[in-house]
Image (spheres, rainbow, N blue to C red):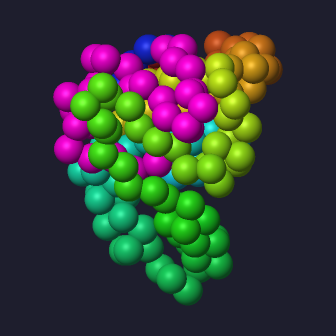
Amino acid sequence: MFLGTHSPRLDDKGRLFLPAKYREELSGGLVITKGQERCLYVFPMAEFQRITEALRAAPVTEKAVRAYSRVFFASASDEIPDKQGRITIPPPLRTYAGLTRDCTVIGANTRLEIWDTQAWETYLEQEEQAFSEISGEVLPGVL
């Protein structure tokens, strides 16, 4: 499970330090791909394989399944962190997420998300009120 908020910086070569607490879990490999709201999703390889199986089982006759799969897999990049715990984010993914230097990495349960720091702050500003209002809808009877 991935939790918390971290603030690494992207270097001039497009490399980003993974949060130290997750380096061991991700040392065997990971997949970076486009996420919603112009962030990047970072999945451990096993979680990406689980998602792949779920999408494989989805009906290819459904237009939404085809569209989602195309973007999701076409933009995916498998990476292995270097000895310092850095990953290289490919230029098209950096462009998609608007990543320049200051980044925010958040834990999002089964994945990490990489955001441009300003985009993350704007997103939080817009969504925090909704967060307090929708917990009953998202988790009825739990919270």
Task: Compare residues 127 and 130 and report the one nearer the observer.
Answer: 127
**Was residue 36 drawn as part of the magenta stretch in this picture?**
no
Give the percent coordinates (x, y) of residue 142: 41, 20
In the figure, is residue 107 to the left or right of 102?
Answer: left
Q: Is residue 120 visible?
A: no
Please report the residue visible at 36 percent of the width from the left and 49 percent of the height from the top. Answer: 79
Q: Please provide the residue range marked out in magenta.
A: 6-32
Task: Compare residues 49 and 18 and report the one nearer the observer.
Answer: 18
Say above or below: 35 vs 76: above
Please report the residue visible at 38 percent of the width from the left and 44 percent of the height from the top. Answer: 43
Say above or below: 21 vs 111: above
**Which residue is outermost to the bottom?**
61
Give the percent coordinates (x, y) of residue 94: 64, 43
Say above or below: 6 vs 31: above
Give the percent coordinates (x, y) of residue 123: 74, 24
Q: Quadrant of the N terminus?
A: top left
Task: Compare residues 139 and 43 and report the one nearer the observer.
Answer: 43
Task: Compare residues 12 and 55 and report the one nearer the observer.
Answer: 12
In the figure, is residue 2 to the left or right of 24?
Answer: right
Please report the residue visible at 63 percent of the width from the left and 72 percent of the height from the top. Answer: 67
**Was residue 30 drawn as part of the magenta stretch in this picture?**
yes
Please report the residue visible at 38 percent of the width from the left and 31 percent of the height from the top. Answer: 86
Give the percent coordinates (x, y) of residue 99: 68, 34
